[in-house]
Amino acid sequence: MATEVLRLNQFDCGILKPLDLVIHERECVCLSGASGSGKSRLLRAIADLDPHGGEAVLRGHAQSAIPAPQWRRRVALLPAESQWWAETVGEHLPKAPAAADLRALDLPAEATSWNVARLSSGEKQRLALLRVVSLSPEVLLLDEPTANLDSDNAARVERWLLRLVREQRLAALWVSHDPAQIERVADARLRIREGEAQWS
Ligand SMILES: Nc1ncnc2c1ncn2[C@@H]1O[C@H](COP(=O)(O)OP(=O)(O)OP(=O)(O)O)[C@@H](O)[C@H]1O
């Protein structure tokens, strides 16, 4: 039987009906719903970046028993809009990205020395993905990870993320508005309707 990674027990992010959810190793759950329905708030609450009620459990350990910085590294959020605070890309990365990952995302080796100010929105999105993955998380909370990408780059990111999820036994909660993408990447689907996340 697949190993459980993330469990939510009556998890309350303040806008949705309390949610019960389990995501296993190598599993990608897609989350969809109308704009403003609460997808980003749910992800931020799971990442412990916003207040919440109920319980989140990582590999059997309650979030309350895990120091917040450690939780946020292990349950890592890719926000819809990435934040950059230092001058160069490399300063945001805990370690140099693998050449294979850069290639898979169609980024040149010198991308780590790029100035943040020059980044296009698509480059920002792919570099933010590299950054979040470089934390070696166990859960990936992905808020529209291909929103700024053309179809070729979106397909590249989908393939790269799915391979990571399978090979590194991650659990992913992936927000998407695109039914075709959901069809390609989802092992299970959650949809927010009338303030409640329901399996679809
Ligand atoms: N910190 C906050 N305090 C109060 N309300 C908030 C806060 N952050 C977001 N909201 C509101 O909560 C609702 C849900 O926002 P959220 O960003 O989760 O939507 P979403 O489903 O991700 O939408 P989209 O698909 O447009 O990104 C919106 O009405 C938003 O204005």
Image: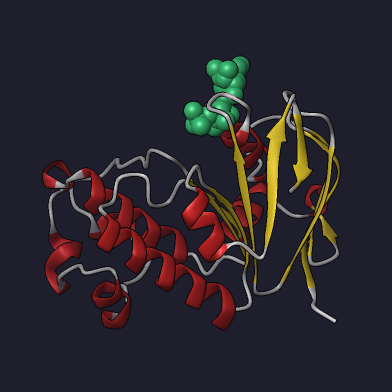
Q: Residue at x 29, y 75 (%)?
A: 104
Report which quarter residue 105 is drawn in.
bottom left
Q: Quadrant of ligand 1?
A: top right
- Residue 190 seen in render: yes
Q: Residue at x 37, y 42 (%)?
A: 82
Of 127 and 174, the residue lying toward us: 174
Residue 44 percent coordinates (x, y): 60, 38
Q: Is residue 153 left or right of residue 190?
A: left
- Residue 119 vertical placement versus 192 (above, below): below
Residue 109 percent coordinates (x, y): 16, 73
Report which quarter residue 61 is drawn in.
bottom right
Residue 19 percent coordinates (x, y): 82, 40
Q: Is residue 8 left or right of residue 45?
A: right
Q: Residue at x 66, y 37 (%)?
A: 42
- Residue 134 seen in render: no
Q: Is residue 147 left or right of residue 153?
A: right
Report which quarter residue 2 is drawn in.
bottom right
- Image quadrant occupied by the N terminus: bottom right
Residue 128 percent coordinates (x, y): 35, 53
Q: Residue at x 43, y 40 (%)?
A: 80
Of 110 and 69, the residue lying toward us: 110
- Residue 190 vertical placement versus 58 (above, below): above
